[in-house]
Image (cartoon, helix red, strand yellow):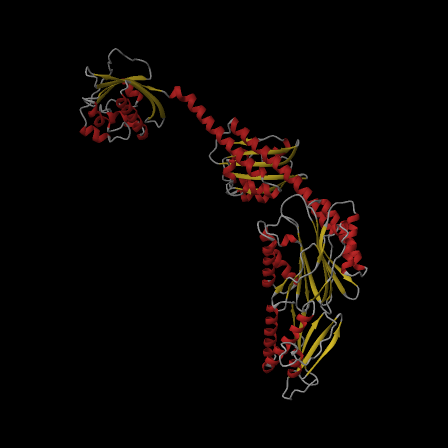
Amino acid sequence: MGEADLPAVLARPLGGVDVAAAERDGPEPVRRSRATLPGERFALNGMGSLEWDLGAGTVVLDEAALEVFDLGPEEFDGTVPGVGLRVPPADGVRLTEIIEGVLAGGGDTYGAYFMVQRRDGRDQWTHTAGRLLRDAAGQPERIVGIVRDATAELAQATLLRKLEAARAQQTTIVQRTTEALSRAVTVDDVTAALTGAGALERLGADGLALGLVEGGTIKIIALSGESLDILSERRFTRLDGSLPLSQAVVTRQARFVTSLSELDGEFPLLSEYLDRIQYDAAAYLPLIAQAKAIGGLVLFYRRRSEFSPEERNLCLGLAGIVAQSLQRALLFDQEREFATGLQAAMLPRRIPEITGGEIAVRYHAAWSGREVGGDWYDVIALPRDRVGVVVGDVQGHDTHAAAIMGQLRIALRAYAGEGHPPSTVLARASRFLAELDTERFATCMYAQVDLETGGIRAVRAGHLGPLIRHTDGRTGWPKVRGGLPLGLATFFEHEEFPETRLDLVPGETLVLCTDGLVEEPGTTITAGMDALAQAVRSGPQGAGPLADHLSDRLWERWGSGDDVALLVLRRAPDPGTHRAPRIHQYVHQADPEGLSEARYALRQALRDWGMPDLADDVELAAGELLVNALLHTDGGAVLTMEVLPEPVRRIRLWVKDRSSVWPRRRSPGEAATTGRGLLLVDALATHWGVESRGDGKAVWCEFDAGDAPRSAG
């Protein structure tokens, strides 16, 4: 037989044979009690011989070889597939490929290890080695070889492989657990790392219970795993050794239990839970840090009958890692509690009640980090029924910043309470900060508000300006002139904090905040300001509900790593009465949208009041008065429209500005493009006039709501 004929012989591998077909179609079985090979004879225990006639396709096995293959004399049919009756298919294919490689490569010998699956269910490692014999022409003729049970030979190697695999698994468990806990900062972070998604798999356990020592008890702070919720009934346990975990903590000795039922007699308190806890084994581990037991850890397992020395060491190692993480977290939480307590003590304990409006404040400490910031807020009762509102931020995020904040807040409150104008209050506060033994500076926004008139005197020291929500829902950032941050202004000898006059009409809302509310990581502060404006527009009317709305929408959205101080002041709305309704509108300078909204509000109000016929005249007159105020003064204007019921029902329109210069009616020529505003008002209204109002003036005009003809004022 030539080499070209061999593939047909080897086409059927040793493993995965159809025994019935082989017995039906194959050659007559050839059996020998002993095979005699040329020049060789084997009689060693566990080793047998084989002879494979490549031409005839028959195989001869001696009795020892039949025993190695676990084949009875009646089972073996003398064929190649018959040899592989108990060889796994994958190993049979591999052996066939090895022999094909010898034939194709012109070699003479081969050797390989493979598996035999014995009838008693045991897997047996087996080794075969052989030689290829050729005829006089050099063509392959026969293969003679040996087979032997190699289980004992490979037992040590198998054990080493298992140990290596277990060691690799343990290393992975330690690495993953260490990595997960390395990111834990607080105790809550530690429990989340031990009970979150994939945590039990990472620990190589099926269940977990974690407890912390508090006084004379151990408090269960984390449970994870099926059926373990019942242990929450014993959330607090005395450290008296009455339960296995408390015993491990008291004695500082780990305990490994391979059958939970064995704890029944020793711990009566545990008896009622054993039938409901669906685990077989458990490791009770004390958590030791700095030579002190700070807690205990229980790892539960299913289908475990023993703890090898390596597994015990792994559990002890995990307990050490958890203990160190918990120790760091406990120290962090203590320092954090102290720092936030100090910070809270520096802030006002209560907010004074105000007449004519409502105020809400919110303060959020940063979510992460041990440090605390120097953000603050304050509400100060001022003479003549005014109120001072302030938010600020001292540079830095540490207890020193919090301490500086407390001193600066008290100083600024004192200067404001003395009745000084806002510019003087900030100048003195800057000087005070510069004289402290610190290199810190602070930003600040301070405003004095008269809720009776709506007048605001605002000053800035390097801080974000205020946001105002108008009665129609629009929001705007009025331009508030500013100076240098407090402390720096004094250092650079530039203690100038120019005031900006604003008006808060009834129903409008003033929002002050520190930059933590508008700084979104990865974006510009402008994007945060736009988000704040949108949240204010969509928020509820009340000061408290709006403050909560902003906290929910922004502070939690940013996941702020910075402190946030928020102050919301709303002036009480003034709708008038049913017989004498009233609306107010503030229009910023150079605000075309505001002019349009004001005209729309007037027309809508007149429709609601049952006087739509006056809408065209009132809207035109209001437009002329507003444009005059916005063009010829340095600020915005307040528009008020009200119904005067006595003695004759009529509409009165007010436009108030901050300028003391009175307007005058002019007589423009035919070619003039300006100067006709008051002429139009005079023609449209029944009366008009000008009055002094505080630090400015108000131009008014009236429209008869009845059928009487209009007369010049």
- Quadrant of the rendered image containing residue 469: bottom right
| Left or right side of 136 for 604 | right
Q: Please report the residue visible at 32 percent of the width from the left and 29 percent of the height from the top.
A: 88
Q: Position of residue 419 (x, y in %)?
A: 80, 61
* Above or below for 438 versus 605: above
Q: Quadrant of the N terminus?
A: top left
- Quadrant of the rendered image containing residue 295: top right
* Above or below for 250 versus 59: below
Residue 243 appears in the picture as rendered: no
Q: Please report the residue visible at 70 percent of the width from the left and 69 percent of the height from the top.
A: 633
Q: Position of residue 238 (x, y in %)?
A: 64, 39
Q: Residue furthest top?
A: 39
Q: Residue furthest bottom?
A: 708
Considering depth in this image, is 541 or 43 the residue closer to the camera? 541
Considering depth in this image, is 416 or 227 the residue closer to the camera? 416
Q: Position of residue 328 (x, y in %)?
A: 64, 38
Q: Quadrant of the C terminus?
A: bottom right
Q: Position of residue 416 (x, y in %)?
A: 78, 59
Residue 172 appears in the picture as rendered: yes
| Left or right side of 279 for 398 | right
Total labels drawn: 0
Considering depth in this image, is 70 or 152 the residue closer to the camera? 152
Q: Residue furthest right?
A: 418
Considering depth in this image, is 675 or 335 the residue closer to the camera? 675
